[in-house]
Amino acid sequence: MLGLLLSRRRFTAKLAIALAGVYCGLVMAEDPKQQVVKAAFVFNIAKFVSWPATNQSTNQLRICSYNTSPLGTGGELLKRRKFHGKPVVLATLEQWEGINRCTILLVSADNLTRFESDRLTAEPKSTLVIADFTQHDDLAGVAYEGVHVSLVRKGTRIGFEINLTGLEESGLKVSSELLKLADIVERPR
């Protein structure tokens, strides 16, 4: 009897592990579940960032996507949230001129080259730049000029990297609590 009970437990444990692997694999595909996870990362990262007083006068958390939104349907959930009592507003920037009205700028890996080129014309001031590299493992582990936080894939999970030098240069401050959870990346020399 004890042997049958242990066999059922092992079977149940193996089934749970297998289902968890399937679920994680599904989340890593570019689907609404992954977009919701990315939206949650963006929102929660923002909670640990302090903007300079010049940016504090805004009455909203304005999350802009550069050309295309990596959040997809996950962004819709953010619109229902409040950030320190302020509404969350989503916008898509098709031109660089509106960059300084954004609290956060999201850049997909597909738009990284254009972002790097456009930012040479005017550096965003007090805008937290978050890049989505979750579909491009080859982009992880390097600090990109102008990018402060990178969402990256860690096996079947999503993690994030912080370019601490870039954050300091932009005047943004990040909590030590967030730094404990991040991988710190440096610019290539």
Image: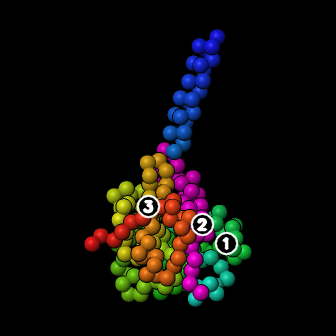
Q: Secondary structure at mark 3?
A: strand
Q: Secondary structure at mark 2?
A: helix
**Of the image marks 2 and 3, the number of the one nearer the N terminus:** 2
Residue closer to the observer: 157 or 179: 179
Counting residues from the start of the chain, the first of labels 1 and 3 encountered is: 1
Residue 80 appears left or right of 165: right
Sequence-first tag of 2 and 1: 2
Residue 47 is inside the magenta segment: yes
**Cβ–Cβ below 8 Å for labels 1 and 3?**
no
Q: CA distance from mark 1 to mark 3?
A: 25 Å
Residue 43 disc label: 2
Above or below 181: residue 166 = below
Q: Nearer the viewer, mark 1 or mark 3?
A: 3
Magenta residues (range): 25-53
Q: How is the image coloured?
A: rainbow
| Residue sticking out furthest to the right | 85
Residue 4 placement (x, y as % from top left): 61, 14
Give the amino acid type for the residue marked by disc 2 in the picture.
Phe
Check residue 131 in the rendering and tell me which mark sits there, or answer none.
none
Say which residue label 1 marks: 83
Note whether 92 is above or below 136 in the view shown. below
Residue at image position (54%, 65%) is 178
Q: Residue 164 at x, y = what percent?
A: 44, 72
> What element does badge 1 sit on?
strand
Q: Percent from the top left, x then y, of residue 16? A: 57, 33
Q: How many marks?
A: 3
Residue drawn at point x = 42 percent, y = 76 percent: 166
Q: Nearer the viewer, residue 111 or 143?
A: 143
Picture quadrant of residue 189:
bottom left
Quickly name the residue at label 3.
183
